[in-house]
Image (spheres, rainbow, N blue to C red):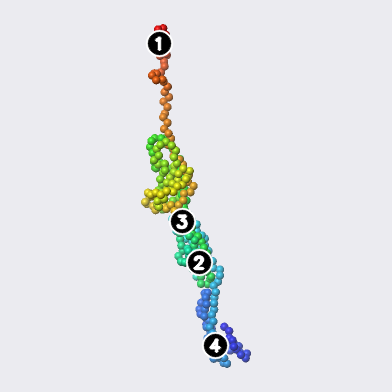
């Protein structure tokens, strides 16, 4: 506070007053009020209020890391740590900063992936804003089928037999898919791809055939009812390895019997028969 208008060598000490200030230490503006007698000696004192402004400090930061994880059926959210924790509040926006909420967003499936703007506010610091991403990637399904061979017997190849040649991994424990075997029912001699059809709960079928070629079709789920049917949107088949099913032709066994002309006897040739044959020829020649 200052005193103006003094004359004749008078000093501020000749004017008596007290000063009070509105309480508060946080950033903001506070009223300062001087008070005293209006008439003091040769002066009429006019008291004017003043103000104290405490500005916000800089240096508040938002520390965090973007999240990028494969689908696992659980919720994922950001971990945000401002460098000043006392008095700091966090707000989140998923629409580019148009609206804000104190509830931290979370994602579970790939379709929910998003960008998140995080704002830290503190009464004594300028706001700090950072942007992060919450990303859930599709879980990878690995399909490996081995070869299966058998001799032709006229009986179709069963799914039970083929199930022992197929290994499908990557589906989380709480979910299930239906596996169909493309070579099931084959009975004729030949070579077939030991492919599979993975049927998801949303009615999407992913068929993996010869050479690992992947085709998507629509079908009806008929898998386990004890687990949650998996959604195709949360998975992708990666680098499948497909074996083959071989049904070998039926080759008749050889009897090793000597070949004979029509009407020719197949009895073994003996010395007696040879002599009889020569004698018969001699008799015929004499006639």
Calculate the distance from the C-alpha at mark 2 to the C-alpha at mark 1.
Answer: 123 Å
Mark earlier in primary sequence (4, 1): 4
Q: CA distance from mark 2 to mark 4?
A: 47 Å
| SS for dot 3 | helix
First along the sequence among labels 4 and 3: 4
| Circle 3 residues within 10 Å: few <14, some 14–19, many ≥20 | some
Q: Mark 2 and mark 4 in contact? Answer it, CB < 8 Å.
A: no
Q: Is residue 219 above or below residue 64?
A: above
Q: Residue at x 46, y 62 (%)?
A: 105
Q: Earlier in the sequence, mark 2 or mark 4?
A: 4
Mark carried by residue 110: 3
Which residue: 51% across, 77% down? 24
Q: Tell me residue 14's x, y (percent).
A: 58, 89
Q: Residue furthest top?
A: 286
Q: Disc 4 designates what residue?
A: 46
Instruction: Please indicate whether residue 55 sits to the left or right of residue 184 in the image.
Output: right
Which comes sooner in the sequence, label 2 or label 3? 3
The location of residue 193, given as percent across then percent down, is 45, 41
Helix, strand or loop status at disc 2: strand
Disc 2: which residue: 119
Precedes in sequence: disc 1 or disc 3: 3
Q: Position of residue 246 (x, y in %)?
A: 44, 38
Label 4 residue SS: loop
Residue bearing mark 1: 280
Residue found at x 57% / y 88%: 15
């Amino acid at each position: 506070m200052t005193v103006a208008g003094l004359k004749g060598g008078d000093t501020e000490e000749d004017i008596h007053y007290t000063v009070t200030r509105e309480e508060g230490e946080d950033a903001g503006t506070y009223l300062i009020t001087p008070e005293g007698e209006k008439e003091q000696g040769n002066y009429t004192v006019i008291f004017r209020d003043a103000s104290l402004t405490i500005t916000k400090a800089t240096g508040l930061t938002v520390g965090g890391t973007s999240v990028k994880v494969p689908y696992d059926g659980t919720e994922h959210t950001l971990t945000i740590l401002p460098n000043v924790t006392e008095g700091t509040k966090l707000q989140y926006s998923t629409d580019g900063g148009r609206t804000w909420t104190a509830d931290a967003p979370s994602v579970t499936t790939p379709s929910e992936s998003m960008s998140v703007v995080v704002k830290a506010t503190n009464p004594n610091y300028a706001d700090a804003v950072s942007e992060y991403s919450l990303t859930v990637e599709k879980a990878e399904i690995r399909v490996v089928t081995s070869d299966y061979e058998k001799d032709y017997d006229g009986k179709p190849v069963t799914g039970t037999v083929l199930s022992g040649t197929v290994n499908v991994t990557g589906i989380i424990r709480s979910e299930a898919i239906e596996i169909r075997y493309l070579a099931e029912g084959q009975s004729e001699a030949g070579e077939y791809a030991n492919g599979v059809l993975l049927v998801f709960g949303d009615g999407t079928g992913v068929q993996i055939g010869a050479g690992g070629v992947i085709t998507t079709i629509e079908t009806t789920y008929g898998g386990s009812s004890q687990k949650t049917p998996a959604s195709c949107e949360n998975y992708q088949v990666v680098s499948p390895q497909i074996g083959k099913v071989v049904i070998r032709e039926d080759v008749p066994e050889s009897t090793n019997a000597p070949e004979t002309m029509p009407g020719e006897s197949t009895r073994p040739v003996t010395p007696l028969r040879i002599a009889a044959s020569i004698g018969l020829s001699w008799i015929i020649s004499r006639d």
